[in-house]
């Protein structure tokens, strides 16, 4: 795992976001279909666990998550709860 991983902050509804949308928003893939294909090939990990379902929903949380696509593409993802801007 590289030391200097980009951090991407994503406004997330309380109901969560599909993992495919998170991958596209993070810039690790260009399209949702590419993201789905990589998930089905077993090339996507969320916090060191393989993502097997392209429809998996990830929920907003205070702690950052490690998103890995393939062997060399990493991002730290912060899913900020939507609707709470300006509060800590």
Image (cartoon, helix red, strand yellow):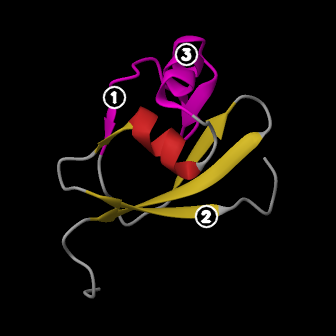
Residue 64: x and y in percent read: 49, 60
Residue farthest front in this picture: 31
Pointer 2 residue:
7
Residues shaded magenta: 31-58
Image quadrant in which you'd find residue 34: top right
59 to the left or right of 20: left
Dot 3 surroundings within 10 Å: few (below 14), some, or many (20 or more)? some
Disc 1 element: loop
Residue 18: x and y in percent read: 34, 36
The residue mark sitting in front, 2 or 3, is: 3
Q: Are marks 2 and 1 in contact (CB under 8 Å)?
A: no
Q: CA gap, disc 2 to disc 1?
A: 21 Å
Residue 41: x and y in percent read: 60, 11
Pointer 1 residue:
56
Residue at the (37%, 66%) spot, across then down: 62
Let me know if residue 13 is in the magenta part.
no
Residue 9: x and y in percent read: 48, 65
Disc 2 element: strand
The quadrant the C terminus occupies is: bottom left
Which disc is residue 22 wearing?
none
58 to the left or right of 7: left
Q: CA gap, disc 3 to disc 1?
A: 14 Å
The residue mark sitting in front, 3 or 1, is: 3
Pointer 3 residue:
37
Whichever of callouts 2 and 3 sits on the residue coming sooner in the sequence is 2
Whichever of callouts 3 and 1 sits on the residue coming sooner in the sequence is 3
Q: Is residue 47 above or below residue 41?
A: below
Let me know if residue 52 is in the magenta part.
yes
Dot 2 surroundings within 10 Å: few (below 14), some, or many (20 or more)? some
Residue at the (25%, 86%) spot, across then down: 87
């Amino acid at each position: 795992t590289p030391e200097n991983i980009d951090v991407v902050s994503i406004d997330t509804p309380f109901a969560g976001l599909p993992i495919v949308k998170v991958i596209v928003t993070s810039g690790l893939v260009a399209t949702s279909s590419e993201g789905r294909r990589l998930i089905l090939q077993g090339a996507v990990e969320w916090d060191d666990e393989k993502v097997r379902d392209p429809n998996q929903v990830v929920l907003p949380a205070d702690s950052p998550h490690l998103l890995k696509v393939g062997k060399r593409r990493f991002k730290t993802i912060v899913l900020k709860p939507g609707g709470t801007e300006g509060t800590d």
